[in-house]
Image (cartoon, rainbow, N blue to C red):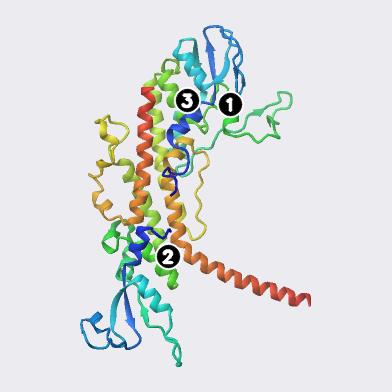
Amino acid sequence: MALPLPPGLNHAEVAFLAEMEMVTVVPRQRLESIDLLSGKTPPLRPPHRAELPLWLALLLKKQRRANIVPPPWLHPSSLTSIIHRETKEDPITFSPPPPPPAHANPHSPGTARRLHEEANLSSPFLPSCTASAPAGYLPYHWLEVAEALLTHAGDDMPAAAGDVRSLLRDLVEVRAAKMRSSTSALEGFGGGLMSLRGVGAMELAESRGFVLGVVDGVRKIGASAEAARREEEEMGGGGGEESDEDMGI
Amino acid sequence: MSYYDIDSILTDAEKIPCTFQLEIPELGYLDNQPGQPLKAGSKIALPLWLAEMLAIANTGGDDQAKSFVTFDLPAALSNEVVQALKADPRAVPLRDQSPHLYGLATHMMDLSEEQELGVVLRKTFVTRASEIALHARKVGGTGHNKGTADEGSNLGVGGAGEEFLRGLEEWERKLFRKAHDGAKAGKEWMENVKKR
C-alpha cells in the first residue's frame, strides 16, 4: 500500500520552507549575533539594516524589536507593472523569475557581470526577498513571503496593506488562469510542452495534482500511437544500420 | 494500472460489438435462440476482455487460421461522437457515452490503429481539462467573498456548470478532484496564515 499522501510538498510545507528566505530588517534594539545551524546571524545595531531569515524577522517583529523592510517587488507599483506584463504584454507565459544578481563595473559601462559566476544560484541561496532584490520580478516564494509579511508586518508596507493584498489577489487570479490555459499547449501531437518557468512554489503546490493529471492523461491517450511510432523507428533504425554495414563491407 | 484497479476492471467490462466468424454449437442463447448453434456472422456485444481474447486467439485448425470474432468500435467511440467532439469538445457529455470513455478508447487504440481517434481524444481531453480546472476553482465560492465556515468543503459542487460537470467521465472526475483539492488546500492555507 502506497502512502496516501499525494506527491510533492503541500502548502504548509512550502510555507515552512519559505521562512528560510532572507529579509531585511531595521532593528529597534541591539541584539548580539545568534549561533544558528545555518550560520551566525549578523549582530543587530539600530538603526543599521541587517538580513535575517524570515522566521526570525517575524519573531522579532511580533516582539516589536524590529521592523521589516518589504522587498521592492512587493511595492504596489512593482506589482502593478507585473500584472500589466502578465495580462497585456504577455498573456501566455508567466513573468520571468528574478535574474541572478549582477555586478556592474562603473568604469566600463555595459559590462555588467554576474556575481559568483561559477556558482549556479537558485531559489534558497538567492537573496530574492531582501531590500536589495530587484523590483518587477517575482521570486520563487513570492506568495508565501508576501502573505506572511502582509499578515504580520502590515504596518511596514510601503502602501496600505489592503491595497497590496488586493493587487496580490489579482496577480494570483491572473496566474491561476494562465496555469489552467497552459495545459492546452499539450494538444500538439507528440510535441506538447508546458513551460512552468517563473511559477512560484505555492502555485506549484496548488496545481501539481491537476497538471500531473493532465500530462498523465495525455500520455495514456498517446501511448499506443507512441508505441507504434517507436516500433516504426526501430525498424527504420535497424534497416539503416544494416545498410551502413553493407557500405562498410 | 494495478490488478485491483476498479476502474480498469470496469473498463474491461464495457461491451463492444463483435461479429462471430464461425458457427459455434450450443451458444445460440447468446443471441436469444436457445438450443440452436450460434451462426457465423451474427453480431453480439461482448465485454472487452472476452472480445480481446477471442479476437486475438485463432482457432488453430488446419485451414487458414481465422479468429473467432472481429470487433468494431463501440457506440461510444462511433463516428458521430468523434465528429461531435471535433466540433466542440465541451458540449459533449462524455459520461452519457461511457463512464470509462478514455480507458475504453486507449484500450481500443492498443488493439487497432486509430490515428484520428487519438488526435481527437487528445484535443478533447486537453480542452476539457482547462474547463474542469475552472470549475474546480469556482466550486465552494471564490477567494474574495467571505462565506460560511464550510465554504471550502467538497459539498459545494453545484451552481453554474453543473451540466458540464455531470458529463465528466471517470478520468475527468479524478482530474476534477485533484484540481479541486489543490484549490481548496490553497484557500485553507490562505485563511490560516492570518490565524497564526
Dots 1 and 2 on the same chain: no
Would you name the residue on which mark 1 appears? A127
Where residue B76 appears, as percent x and y from the top left, is: 31, 67
Q: Nearer the viewer, mark 2 or mark 3?
A: 2
Residue A60 location (% of width, % of height): 49, 14
* Marks 1 & 2, CB-CB < 8 Å contact: no
Q: Nearer the viewer, residue B16 or A149?
A: B16
Q: Are marks 3 and 1 in contact (CB under 8 Å)?
A: no
Quadrant of the image occupied by residue B61: bottom left
Instruction: Give, as a three-letter code, the residue at label 2.
Output: Gly
Quarter of the rendering occupied by the C terminus of chain A:
bottom right
Residue at which label 3 appears: A74
Q: Check disc 1 and give the amino acid type.
A: Pro
Crowd class of label 3 (few under 14; some 14 to 19; many from 20; radius 10 Å): many
Q: Residue B118: which disc? A: 2
Q: Chain of mark 2?
A: B
**Residue B86 shows in the view:** no
User: Nearest the camera: A77 or A171?
Assistant: A171
Asked which secondary structure carries label 3, the reply is helix
- Structural crowding at the residue carrying mark 2, measured as other residues with C-alpha within 10 Å and reported as few (<14), some (14–19) or many (≥20): many
